[in-house]
Amino acid sequence: MRETLAGGLDTPEQELRFHTFDVGFHEAIASASGNRVLGYLFEAMAQPLREGFYISRRGHEQRGHTLAHTIEAHQRILDCIRQGNGRAAAEAMRLHLKDTERDIRTALSQLRRDFPKASCQSTACGNTPLAAISAP
């Protein structure tokens, strides 16, 4: 992820590569946890998760955060795992996912401001132009 970030995310291909590593990090943690349900969820929800990561990134930027913040959060989680501190790793992951939730809420709030006539119901139906904030 660091190498991808250092090379910039100026093209859709570079952004896709960063997101691929991001999803891969979460998949590796889920797999290493031994929780088979999480593994199945990642597999079954691959496309929605990918779209969620793009939406999250938009909110992350809108909140004034950088992708370096994402890498730092991942590093904290990884450090706790390497130290064998499951509780601290779980807490670091919880905080990271809570931050991601805030990012998604921020991006969706912006979408509602940009497209005020779109209802939440139409978003679920795919009638709202989510492409404005999702994958390039």
Image (cartoon, grey):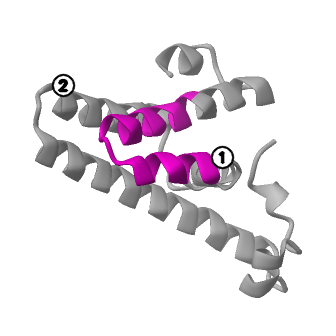
User: Which residue position holds label 2?
Assistant: 82
Q: CA distance from mark 2 to mark 1?
A: 27 Å
Circle 2 sits in a helix, a strand or a loop, which is it?
helix
User: Which residue position holds label 1?
Assistant: 50
- Give the magenta part as a residue range: 21-44
Q: Position of residue 19 (x, y in %)?
A: 61, 34
Task: Tell me what residue is drawn at x 72 percent, y 83 percent.
Answer: 120
Residue 111 is marked as none
> Could you tell me what secondary structure mostly forms the magenta stretch?
helix
Q: Amino acid at mark 2?
A: Arg
Q: Is residue 8 above or below residue 108?
A: above
Observer-nearest of 33 and 132: 33
Q: Is residue 5 visible?
A: yes
Q: Amino acid at mark 1?
A: Arg
Q: Is residue 49 visible?
A: no
Q: Position of residue 132 (x, y in %)?
A: 81, 57
Q: Is residue 26 on the magenta stretch?
A: yes
In the image, taking residue 122 as reference, residue 50 lies left or right, namely: left
Task: Tell me what residue is drawn at x 54 percent, y 38 percent.
Answer: 23
